[in-house]
Amino acid sequence: MMRVLHVLDHSLPLHSGYAFRTRAILKAQQAIGLEVRAVTGPRHAAEVSGKSEAGAVERIEGLTFHRTAGGAAGPLLVRELREVSALTASIKTIAKEWRPHVVHAHSPALCGAAGLRAARALGVPFVYEIRAFWEDAAVGNKTGVEGSAKYRLTRAVETEVARQADAVFTICDGLRDDLAARGLPAGKIGVMRNGVDLTLFGDPPPRDHALARALGLVEGASVIGYVGSLYDYEGVDDLIAAMPMLRAEHPGARLLVVGGGNMEEAWRLAAERLPERDTVIFAGRVPHTQVERHYSLIDVLAYPRKRSRLTDLVTPLKPLEAMAQRRLVAASDVGGHRELIEDGVTGALFSADDPAACATALSELLTAREVWPAMRAAALARVHERHDWARNVERYHSVYHHLLTILKRESGGPSDISARANATVRSRTDEEKARAQG
């Protein structure tokens, strides 16, 4: 049985799009017969301090996670070098007992650097997967500055890790095209799109009347929903600003915001400044098991991301989950959303950074209820066709198998693996394009 070790920044029990994508990948790989484990870096241990012991092995939902101890202290650069060293050591320690056939690291670049070092020392293929450019994510989260020394260094390290990897995956076309523009061979980069575990989504849940009463949502009110993290680039402030314009056409419309983040306080204040203060309801962070109850109250999920490098290059997960839940989706027309949603067919797109355009799109959707069944069906079909982990995960297996075949046949070392693997990754990419066009 093929054994694959995934190298991660963080994982369950933390709740994030990153953690849920990881869960879906590991579960889907288990389902096709791979043996998988994952190791997280020192930052995971810092995030869950008091909840899980650094250096321990945790079993969560039938998945095995190794935790890396130490390495997360010190000044800039020194701290990062310590993190890479600690994570590299963890990978090597796991390998002594478990002996993985493939090391598959996921961004950020620190995980990639540790995975690359360990894989080369172990003599096994190294696969690197980029889910976002973390220097751009830092800008979006207001923890970094575009063009700064740290920004440029992070970008340079990631480019070098991708260059040395035996195969590279990105989650969308935007990231792939950006890497190709940096000089990486296009054939080396495959696309493993964001997806959902469709076994988790059955028939839409019935309206939870008790929850509606608890939140103050009256029967018959049109409910716009936002479910996700409350970071600046998500643009929830534009959605809040759109609500008075929407209520001019649909007086009973309300906005339900589910989630938390560093902009929550500011956006609560923005909602309180609206002419009608009860227009927006903040549910706060809710356990993942309770999110479905909130979905049951929502007519249209709105995702008003602001335009930036991050949002133009990266596809989010939440719209796909909403589509799998057979919920209508309206989203800003940033690049990441355009890869997921076909305007007027599987959802609605509106101009980014424009509350009036957001209000117009939402109003038109609420008015045209006769198109809802067809739009929901088209969105669900799109998820099944392009974003079902049970189908898509096979492409990982093909690349792993090819890399291992090359390793077995060739004696020239890891560089030969990378050079000869390009054809297989390219064929997987071409197959994906053909499916999309078909």
Image: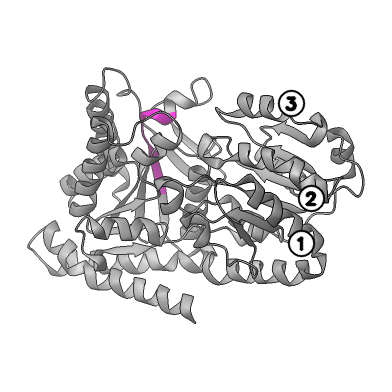
Taking the magenta stretch, the answer to whether it contains residue 172 is: no
Crowd band around label 1 with a 10 angstrom C-alpha radius: few (<14), some (14–19), many (20+): few
Q: Is residue 277 above or below residue 178?
A: above
Dividing the image into 4 quarters, which one contains the N terminus? bottom left
Look at label 2 and name its amino acid: Ser
**Image: magenta residue range:** 37-44
Mark 3 or 1, nearer chain start: 1
* Residue 276 percent across, percent down from the top left: 82, 32
Type of amino acid under label 3: Glu
Question: Mark 1 or 2 closer to N-term?
Answer: 1
- The nearer-to-camera label among 1 and 2 is 2
Count of numbered tags: 3
Q: Residue at x 55, y 65 (%)?
A: 388
**Residue situated in front as seen by the camera: 173 or 357:** 357
Which residue in the protein does label 2 denote?
A: 296
In the displayed structure image, the side of residue 321 where residue 127 appears, left or right? left
Is residue 39 part of the magenta span, yes or no? yes
Residue assigned mark 1: 203
Residue 279 is drawn in which quadrant?
top right
